[in-house]
Amino acid sequence: MYGLVNQGVKDLVLNKFGEETWQSICDEAGLKSDRFLRMKSYPDDVTYSLVGAASKVLELSPEDILIAFGRHWVLFTAQGGYGDLFDMAGDNLFDFLHQLDELHTRVKLNFPELRTPSFRCTDVKASSLRLEYHSHRDGLSALVVGLLHGLSDRFQTPLDVTHEVKREDTGTHDIFFVSLTEPPGGAK
Ligand code: 1DX
């Protein structure tokens, strides 16, 4: 994945736990350098090793690390130079989810080594939808849960997420049921 992703993990760890913890995680991951070029493509192993090492050092499950990272990613990228990309993709949660593939298409124009996941919305209702997550990568469904929470923070839209269908079952994608816990438009 692009170095931006590894940089996002680093940013999260530094903010929440500090320099020493970050160094332990790098040692545990066997990283030669903790400098990432954001616009350079790195082997996925680097990212998976960082998640594994963070899980070990922080004594949290890999899923918890992925959830925290997904949540952080939304802030990190929206405030870290990609604000326009987010603004273009919609001003509310459901619009944003509908436009995610376009957002990725836009990034891919400039960064062709991006291996973009695909997100499809189905069963769209006023306060719920199902989100299909198709990915080239394995083991990142907890990341999507975190991303959804990050978007919930961004749009101040409280939500529940259930991982309804696992990729093991479909062979191709995960399905998340996303429901708003407050009625849309603020009506009670
Ligand atoms: F709900 O399944 C909200 O490297 C969401 O593969 C989901 O293949 C926001 F310059 C610049 C660059 C760089 C900008 F090239 C990425 F470096 C992309 C910024 C998306 C913001 C996907 C990152 C593929 C890297 C997917 C989990 C894992 C998508 C990560 C989150 C907004 C992004 O992101 C998978 C890669 C950006 C950039 C966003 C992603 C790669 C997402 C979201 N993805 C690189």
Image: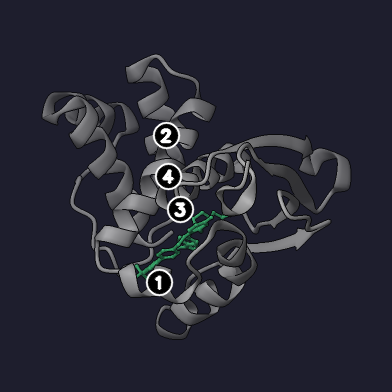
Kindly check if marks 2 and 3 are in contact, taking CB atoms under 8 A apart as contact.
Answer: no
Mark 2 sits on what residue? 68
Residue 158 vs 105, above or below: the answer is above
Residue 113: x and y in percent read 47, 73
- Whole-Å distance between the Cαs marked 4 and 3? 6 Å
Earlier sequence position, callout 1 versus callout 4: 1
User: Is residue 112 visible to us here?
Assistant: no
Residue 163 coordinates in the image, percent (x, y): 72, 36
- Residue 63, placed above or below residue 158: above
Q: Please name the residue that numbered disc 3 is placed on.
A: 155
Crowding at dot 1, Cα within 10 Å, few <14 / some 14-19 / many 20+, comes out as few
Image disc number at residue 153? 4
Residue 11 or residue 126, whichever sits in front: 126
The answer to whether mark 4 is within 8 Å of ligand 1 is no
Q: Local crowd at mark 4 within 10 Å, few (<14), some, or many (≥20)?
A: some
Secondary element under disc 1, as helix, strand or loop, is: helix
Q: Tell me the quarter of the image containing the C terminus.
A: top right
Q: Which residue type carries mark 3?
A: Phe
Determine whether, in the image, residue 11 is placed left or right of residue 127. Answer: left
State the separation of the CA atoms marked 1 and 3.
Answer: 11 Å
